[in-house]
Image (spheres, rainbow, N blue to C red):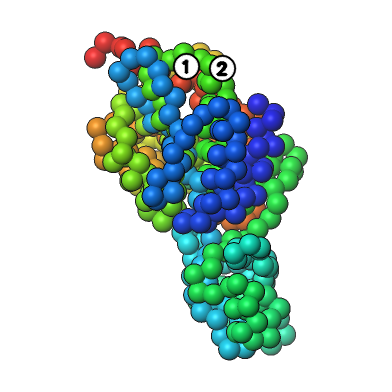
C-alpha cells in the first residue's frame, strides 16, 4: 500500500478543476493501460474500465477526477484578471495564495492583489475579501500581454501546492477526490487476476464538484446492483471545534456515510461493510449525517444500492488539505476486502 501514498500525491498534484480533468485522466489512463485494462472515455470525459466476471451481478465503483478551482471571467485593460469559482471555494482563504492557470501548453502563475493593512480602514480590515472583488496579477502590464500568454475568459485555474508529507499526515490540494481515484487504481491492480462472480465497472467521473454531472451520465449508461463511492470527505476535528461539530476525524479510519444531502445509502449494505471492517480489524467511523454530497446522489436515482466510503481530510476545499496516512491505507484495505466479500452479500437470502 505504501506505493499508493506516492501515487496519491502525484494524483493530487495533477491539474484538474471540473470540466478540465484532462491531466488527471491522462495519468490514470497511463496507469490502467500498464495494468492491461482497456477503457473508454465518453463524451463528457468520464473514464470507464470494466472488469468482467462470472455471473449476473454488476458493481459500479466510482471516484471523481475533478477538483474545485476557478475560471477566468474578465481581464482589465491594465492587466488584472477576475475569476469565477468552479465548485465551492471559500473566499476567505484566497488572498496570499498563488493561482496556477492552464493555457494551451503551459502553466502561468499569478497572485491575488491585496492592499496592505496600512491603507485599510478598521472596517475593511475586519471583512473578508470576496472573490468578485479580488483581482489576479500575473505580472503583466496590459490586457494584450495577458492574452498573448494564452489566458482569456474561460481559462481554468487552481491554487496549487505540491503535496508533501507532514508528520503522519500528507498535505495536498486535491485529496477530494484523488484519494478516491487512488483507491480505484489500487483495486484495479489488486483484483487484476482475481476471478470474481460479478462485473466491476470502474468509473472515474468528471464534474462532481459542480453537481455530480459526470456520474449522472454514467448512471444512464451502466446499470448495476451496487454503487460504491470512494471519496475524500471533510474532517473538522481541528482545535476549537466542539465534539458535536466534528463531521469526521482524521486518524479514526475510513468514514462511512449514514446520510448526506445527496443520498441515503443502503443501510443493509452499510451493515455489511461494517461487518467486513470488523472481521479484518480495520477501524472505521461514521460521517455525521446531513452534511455534503457525493456521486452517490446520482447512482441513488437508479435501482442500485449505494454506499459511500471516504478518507477524512482536514481543510478540504482549500489548497492545503491534510489526510492521515493510516486513514488512507485503511481505506485501501477496506475497499479490497469489501469487494472480495461482496458475493456473500449479493447471494444472501433476501
Ligand atoms: Zn468529492
State whether residue 182 is above or below residue 291. Answer: above
Q: Which residue is drawn at 43% across and 29% down?
A: 50
Q: Can residue 37 be seen in this view?
A: yes
**Mark 1: secondary structure:** helix
The residue that disc 1 covers is 340
From the viewer's perspective, is 117 left or right of 247?
right
From the viewer's perspective, is 295 left or right of 247?
left
Give x and y (percent) for residue 42: 40, 45
The residue that disc 2 covers is 281
**Mark 2: secondary structure:** loop
Give x and y (percent) for residue 246: 51, 44
The one nearer the camera, 190 or 147, is: 147
Which one is closest to the eye, mark 1 or mark 2? 1
State whether residue 141 is above or below residue 199. Answer: below
Lower position in the chain sequence, tag 1 or tag 2: 2
Q: Quadrant of the N terminus?
A: top right
Crowding around mark 2 (Cα neighbors within 10 Å: few <14, some 14 to 19, many 20+) is few
Q: Quadrant of residue 77?
A: bottom right
Amino acid at each position: 500500500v505504501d506505493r499508493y501514498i506516492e501515487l496519491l500525491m502525484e494524483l493530487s498534484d495533477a491539474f484538474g478543476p471540473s470540466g478540465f480533468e484532462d491531466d488527471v485522466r491522462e495519468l490514470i489512463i497511463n496507469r490502467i493501460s500498464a495494468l492491461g485494462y482497456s477503457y473508454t472515455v465518453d463524451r463528457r470525459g468520464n473514464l470507464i474500465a470494466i472488469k468482467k466476471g462470472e455471473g449476473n451481478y454488476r458493481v459500479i465503483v466510482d471516484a471523481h477526477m475533478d477538483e474545485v478551482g476557478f475560471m477566468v471571467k474578465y481581464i482589465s485593460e491594465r492587466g488584472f484578471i477576475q475569476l469565477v469559482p468552479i465548485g465551492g471555494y471559500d473566499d476567505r482563504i484566497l488572498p496570499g495564495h498563488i493561482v496556477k492557470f492552464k493555457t494551451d501548453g503551459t502553466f502561468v502563475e499569478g497572485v491575488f492583489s491585496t492592499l496592505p493593512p496600512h491603507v485599510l480602514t478598521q472596517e475593511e480590515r475586519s471583512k473578508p475579501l470576496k472573490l468578485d472583488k479580488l483581482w489576479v496579477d500575473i505580472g503583466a502590464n496590459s490586457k494584450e500581454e495577458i492574452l498573448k500568454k494564452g489566458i482569456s475568459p474561460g481559462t481554468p485555474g487552481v491554487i496549487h501546492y505540491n503535496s508533501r508529507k507532514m508528520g503522519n499526515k500528507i498535505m495536498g490540494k486535491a485529496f477530494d477526490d484523488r484519494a478516491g481515484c487512488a483507491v480505484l487504481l489500487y483495486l484495479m491492480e489488486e483484483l487484476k487476476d482475481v476471478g470474481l462472480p460479478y462485473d466491476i465497472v470502474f468509473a472515474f467521473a468528471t464534474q462532481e464538484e459542480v453537481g455530480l454531472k459526470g456520474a449522472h451520465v454514467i448512471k444512464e449508461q451502466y446499470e448495476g446492483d451496487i454503487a460504491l463511492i470512494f471519496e475524500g470527505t471533510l474532517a473538522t476535528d481541528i482545535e476549537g471545534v466542539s465534539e458535536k461539530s466534528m463531521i469526521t476525524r482524521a486518524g479514526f479510519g475510513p468514514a462511512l456515510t449514514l446520510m448526506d444531502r445527496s443520498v441515503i445509502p443502503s443501510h443493509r449494505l452499510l451493515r455489511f461493510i461494517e461487518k467486513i471492517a470488523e472481521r479484518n480489524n480495520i477501524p472505521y467511523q461514521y460521517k455525521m449525517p446531513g452534511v455534503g454530497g457525493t456521486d452517490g446522489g446520482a447512482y441513488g436515482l437508479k435501482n442500485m444500492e449505494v454506499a459511500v466510503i471516504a478518507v477524512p481530510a482536514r481543510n478540504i476545499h482549500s489548497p492545503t488539505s491534510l489526510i492521515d496516512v493510516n486513514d488512507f491505507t485503511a481505506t485501501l484495505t477496506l475497499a479490497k476486502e469489501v469487494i472480495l466479500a461482496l458475493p456473500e452479500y449479493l447471494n444472501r437470502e433476501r
